[in-house]
Image (tube, rainbow, N blue to C red):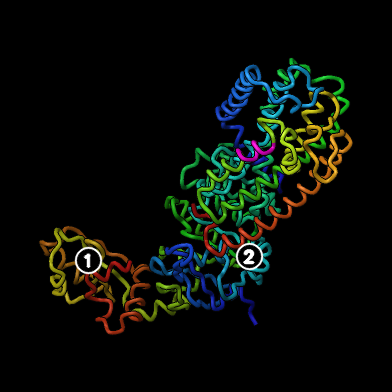
């Protein structure tokens, strides 16, 4: 049923072509801005792995922009999904025809994710090629890329469901969603290298989306995972700045982070749906 | 023993109507309601604004959950077996809508999948009602009447045991209304209809019971339509539009029960002879701009009971002034 909801949204979204065009433009503008930033600013020495090379910061920002372009729109669409379905008058028909709130939200996320992936990839891929990030080594690492990418997508799906569930009880959650996604972008290193922050990096880096982005950046820029951290600064729990240790860290953060958030999102949607049906707020905005 | 298709026992539903987060203020929309409907029976729910009709419908449809009490639909508890309730129950209301950028076929396919039903009968239904040629059109081009038909097409996908319908023929033209009533009436053996409607024709054609609710969400009366009609001595009403607002005791001179509805005056009569005598007098009355006569409506029946039960000391259905009509 989730796939049917996804198809329903895809068919509907496809009719709003200007919206798709503006979303692509937004990604392109972001890339242009980050090019300017990378040309005018330099990160602290040692904040990025040495193998990233001279234009490492530009590549770093490009990949961050690309990956967040994939996840931002699905998150925002999912959080706004229930209020929008209600305003359109479609929510009542859905929930009385066995389409649960969870399925509605999952279908919304997946549809937006598919669209974002197609649009952002079309806009960004040529630049990745020009910057030398699409090589034979990238192709060899494709299974790892897809696996990490999939895990990050599940994490973002869970976080989107969790935040979207607030809209069952609290109205006008749009600002909360904006704060949340902006905070997440900052915390997960869209604009700066997380592992340049000493011990704090272990907290921020443990967020699945954060560790995933770092690993994908490594693979696209250098072809292999790197050891992260600044020698002598990260001392927590026997942390070492080796690639092997980092891969272990990524796997742990993905598995624990995704499972924990999936559990929270499930409980949150179940609990809030029941409460919204009791309070009568499920289809009132 | 005949099986109950609906069982409502000590139902309480309240909503927050104000107050702060620490001291919320709640109002009981339904307060201790109990009633049941046997399989094969069909009921029209009537009541004034605030009597809990729509809330009750939404509880039966699984959109809201009861705060207290139990509600069973088609043999299943709406709290514990909601999915089973949804499999057997269809809800149709003008407020329910669909994505406007999808075609009718896409919409039917989607809902067909969600409930595990075939869409061919729904397409045939639309065909029979002259909307079949629009099957590949986007929903945004549908008229309100065509949207109403699409809602019924979706509702019928389930082959439901219970149909909850808010305003059955809303937005339909006279011919389609007649056709739809015939169609639904032909399904009465297999589907139990629970409707909110004040249209006497619809109630008469689709239901055999009336559930009258009081403000505050309690049952005023549940009974057989014919039995209830027999208890009311009045059969006709004469709706008068005066030229100007005049003192209400002016209308007492006709010695016929009346009530004010906004700027109108409504007389009620027991026999055709009374109607004839009254209208003859009205024709000569310079204060009367126009008048129409008709059979007693469901609202009139409801109002009659409301007055007789809530205003036992009142003068009956007649001589109800402008103040009291705010009840409507």
- Vertical position of residue B126 compared to residue A266: above or below: above
Left or right of residue A47: residue B123: left
Of residues A120 and B234, the one drawn nearer to the viewer in this rendering: A120
Viewer-nearest residue: A136 or B157: A136
| Residue position for label 2 | B161
Residue B137: x, y in percent?
Answer: 56, 36
Say which chain tag 2 marks. B
The verdict on residue A183 being magenta is yes
Name the outermost residue toward the front: A232
Question: Which sits earlier in the primary sequence, circle 1 or circle 2?
Answer: 2
Are dots 1 and 2 on a single chain?
yes
Q: Quickly name the residue at label 1.
A: B265
* Residue depicted at 43% across the width and 73% down the height: B212
Q: Is residue B154 visible to the viewer in this orientation of the structure?
A: yes
The answer to the question of whether label 1 and label 2 lie on touching residues, with beta carbons closer than 8 A, is no
Start and end of the magenta stretch?
A: A182-188
Disc 1: CA contacts within 10 A as few (<14), some (14-19) or many (>=20): many
Q: Is residue A19 magenta?
A: no
> Could you say whether the residue bearing mark 1 is in a helix, strand or loop?
strand
- At 56% from the left edge and 31% from the top edge, which residue is drawn? A16
Does residue B4 lie above or below B119 as drawn? Answer: below
């Amino acid at each position: 049923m989730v796939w049917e909801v996804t198809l329903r949204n895809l068919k509907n979204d496809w009719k709003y072509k200007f919206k798709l065009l503006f979303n692509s433009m937004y990604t392109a503008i972001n890339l242009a801005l980050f090019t300017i930033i990378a040309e005018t600013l330099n990160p602290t020495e040692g904040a990025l792995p040495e193998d990233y090379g001279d234009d490492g910061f530009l590549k770093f920002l490009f990949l961050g922009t690309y990956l967040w372009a994939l996840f931002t729109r699905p998150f925002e669409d999912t959080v706004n999904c229930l209020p929008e379905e209600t305003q359109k008058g479609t929510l009542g028909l859905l929930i009385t025809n066995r389409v649960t709130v969870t399925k509605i939200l999952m279908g919304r996320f997946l549809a937006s994710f598919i669209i974002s992936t197609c649009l952002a990839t079309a806009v960004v891929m040529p630049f990745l090629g020009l910057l030398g990030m699409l090589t034979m080594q990238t192709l060899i690492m494709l299974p790892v890329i897809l696996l990490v990418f999939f895990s990050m997508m599940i994490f973002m799906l869970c976080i989107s469901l969790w935040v979207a569930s607030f809209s069952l009880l609290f109205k006008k959650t749009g600002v909360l969603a904006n704060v949340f996604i902006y905070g997440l972008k900052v915390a997960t290193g869209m604009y700066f290298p997380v592992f340049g922050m000493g011990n704090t990096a272990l907290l921020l880096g443990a967020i699945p989306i954060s560790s995933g982005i770092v690993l994908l950046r490594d693979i696209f820029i250098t072809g292999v995972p790197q050891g992260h951290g600044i020698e002598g600064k990260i001392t927590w729990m026997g942390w070492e700045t080796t690639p092997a240790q980092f891969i272990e860290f990524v796997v742990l953060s993905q598995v624990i982070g995704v499972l924990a958030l999936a559990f929270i999102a499930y409980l949150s949607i179940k609990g809030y749906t029941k409460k919204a049906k009791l309070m009568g707020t499920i289809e009132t905005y | 023993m005949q099986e109950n298709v609906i069982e409502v026992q000590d139902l309480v539903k309240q909503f927050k109507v104000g107050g702060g987060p620490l001291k919320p203020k709640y109002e009981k929309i339904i307060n201790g309601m109990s009633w049941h409907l046997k399989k094969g029976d069909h009921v029209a729910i009537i009541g004034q604004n605030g009597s809990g009709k729509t809330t009750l419908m939404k509880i039966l449809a699984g959109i809201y959950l009861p705060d207290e009490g139990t509600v069973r639909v088609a043999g299943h508890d709406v709290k514990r077996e909601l999915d089973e309730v949804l499999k057997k129950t269809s809800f149709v209301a003008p407020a329910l809508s669909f994505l406007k950028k999808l075609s009718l076929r896409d919409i039917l396919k989607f809902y067909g999948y969600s409930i595990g039903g075939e869409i061919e009968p729904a397409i045939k239904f639309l065909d029979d009602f002259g909307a079949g040629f629009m099957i590949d059109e986007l929903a945004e081009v549908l008229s309100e009447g065509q949207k109403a038909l699409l809602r019924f097409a979706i509702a019928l996908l389930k082959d439901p045991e219970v149909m909850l319908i808010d305003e059955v023929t809303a937005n339909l033209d006279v011919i389609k209304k007649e056709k739809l009533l015939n169609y639904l009436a032909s399904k009465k053996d297999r589907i139990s209809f629970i409707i909110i409607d004040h249209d006497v024709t619809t109630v008469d054609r689709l239901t055999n019971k009336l559930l009258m609710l009081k403000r505050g969400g309690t049952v005023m009366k549940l009974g057989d339509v014919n039995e209830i009609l027999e208890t009311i001595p009045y059969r006709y009403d004469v709706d008068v539009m005066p030229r100007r607002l005049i003192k209400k005791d002016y209308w007492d001179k006709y010695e016929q029960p009346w009530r004010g509805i906004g700027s109108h005056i409504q007389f009620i009569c027991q026999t055709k002879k009374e109607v004839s005598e009254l209208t003859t007098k009205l024709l000569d009355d310079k204060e009367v701009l126009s008048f129409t006569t008709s059979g007693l409506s469901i609202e009139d029946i409801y109002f009659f009971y409301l007055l007789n039960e809530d205003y036992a000391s009142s003068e009956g259905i007649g001589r109800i002034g402008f103040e009291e009509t705010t009840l409507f």
